Image (cartoon, rainbow, N blue to C red):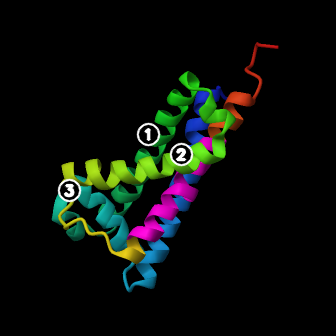
Amino acid sequence: MSWSPAVFAILVGGSIAGALDIAYAISFSVLRGGSAAGLLQTVASGLLGASSYDGGTATAALGLALHFLLALLFAAAFFLSARRVPVLVRRAVPFGVLYGLVVFAIMKFIVLPLSAFPHPIRFSLLATGTDLLSHMFFVGLPIALATRAALSRPTPGRP
């Protein structure tokens, strides 16, 4: 099967980033006494507000779907940017890490405040520091590396 560069970059980069980031988030939540379902319901609370905690498995599944949707959208944004700014692919590692910082900032300062997220946005040293590292190395970097791989592959029908 031959995927277009866009499909490859978005599906592979977004899926890897989504899986690594949610694994980090669930692990961090469980280590602090929470649960996987509770963390996923917290993700869904961005859409549903506090009622997400009353939805059981259904809202946890919605949270997981929303998380991966965002990861795929961030992968698409990087891919589209890299097509216009080739240095993003040539220097995928530093720009991927930087993109993780951008994704972190977009989530904390734009997405969460504009959503129905029912909790105050806090910045404790441990949670913010690990979340920042997670976005740098588990989100931005895989997206950039998948985009580099996609754009360096020969396109079907082209020599």
Q: Earlier in the sequence, mark 3 or mark 2?
A: 2
Could you tell me which secondary element the residue under label 3 belongs to?
helix
Q: Quadrant of the C terminus?
A: top right
Q: Earlier in the sequence, mark 1 or mark 2?
A: 2
Q: Quadrant of the N terminus?
A: top right
Q: Amino acid at mark 3?
A: Leu
Q: Residue at x 29, y 69 (%)?
A: 56
Furthest residue to the top? 158
Residue ID for mark 1: 73
Residue ID for mark 2: 14
- Magenta-highlighted residues: 128-145
User: Residue 102, position in %: x, y?
Assistant: 43, 47
Q: Compared with residue 125, is residue 69 higher up or lower down, i.e. above or below?
A: above
Q: Earlier in the sequence, mark 1 or mark 3?
A: 3
Q: Residues within 10 Å of mark 3 (few under 14, many from 20)?
A: many
Q: Amino acid at mark 1?
A: Leu
**Which residue occupies the foreground of this view, 95 or 64?**
95
Q: Compared with residue 52, is residue 5 higher up or lower down, i.e. above or below?
A: above
Residue 51 appears anywhere in the view: yes
User: Residue 98, position in %: x, y?
Assistant: 52, 48
Q: Is residue 156 magenta?
A: no
Q: Residue at x 55, y 52 (%)?
A: 17
Q: Residue at x 50, y 45 (%)?
A: 99
Count how many numbered circles sit on residues in the image: 3
Furthest residue to the right? 159
Left or right: where does residue 55 sit relative to residue 12? left
Residue ID for mark 3: 48
User: Residue 53, position in %: x, y?
Assistant: 23, 70
Disc 1 from disc 3: Cα separation: 20 Å
